[in-house]
Image (tube, rainbow, N blue to C red):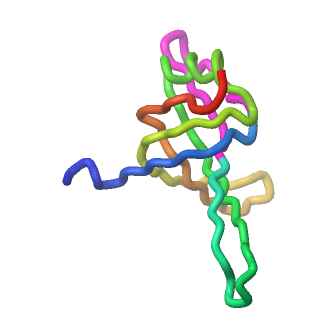
């Protein structure tokens, strides 16, 4: 049951190509977003589709693999954990964010 703590599994499509930054000679980070879709029927019986966007972070070797093989629109399955943080923008407003730090991912769909 310890694997259930702070565990996230998502399947969706990338909204952009991975953006990779080299932090040091041995550290790289890739950032991208993934869209997940959910559909349901509302009170009137109409089909409603909602899209949620999730920010992903991949480190080191996974960042390299993502940069090499993933592109906007790629379908992926990811597993990771939620992290959150905050920062103060240029106008002095405190902003909050949530990200999924990816521990594993699988490329789905067509090659």
Residue at the image point whose x is 51% and y is 18% from the top: 27
Residue at the image point whose x is 72% and y is 63% from the top: 93
Q: Residue furthest front?
A: 45
Question: Residue 72's x, y, as percent?
Answer: 75, 33
Residue at the image point whose x is 26% and y is 48% from the top: 3
In the image, is residue 59 above or below residue 55? above
Question: Residue 56's x, y, as percent?
Answer: 58, 41
Prevailing SS of the magenta stretch: strand
| 110 falls in the magenta region | no
Residue at the image point whose x is 21% and y is 51% from the top: 2
Query: In this rendering, would 81 be left or right of 51?
Result: left
Question: Residue 103's image quarter?
Answer: top left
In the image, is residue 21 above or below residue 42? above
* Camera-side residue of 74 and 16: 74
Question: Residue 49's image quarter?
Answer: bottom right
In the image, is residue 68 above or below residue 73? above
| 33 falls in the magenta region | yes
Query: Which residues lie in the magenta part?
Result: 17-34
Of the 4 image quadrants, the one containing the C terminus is top right
Of the 4 image quadrants, the one containing the N terminus is bottom left
Question: Residue 88's x, y, as percent?
Answer: 67, 55
Q: Residue furthest left?
A: 1
* Camera-side residue of 76 and 29: 76
């Amino acid at each position: 049951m310890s694997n259930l703590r702070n565990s996230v599994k998502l399947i969706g499509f990338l909204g952009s190509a991975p953006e990779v930054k080299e932090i040091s000679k041995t550290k790289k980070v890739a950032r991208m977003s993934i869209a997940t879709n959910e559909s349901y029927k509302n009170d009137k019986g109409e089909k409603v589709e909602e899209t949620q966007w999730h920010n992903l972070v991949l480190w080191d070797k996974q960042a390299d693999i993502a940069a090499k093989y993933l592109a906007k629109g790629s379908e992926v399955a990811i597993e990771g954990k939620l992290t959150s943080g905050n920062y103060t923008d240029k106008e002095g407003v405190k902003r909050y964010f949530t990200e999924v730090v990816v521990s594993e991912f699988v490329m789905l769909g067509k090659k």
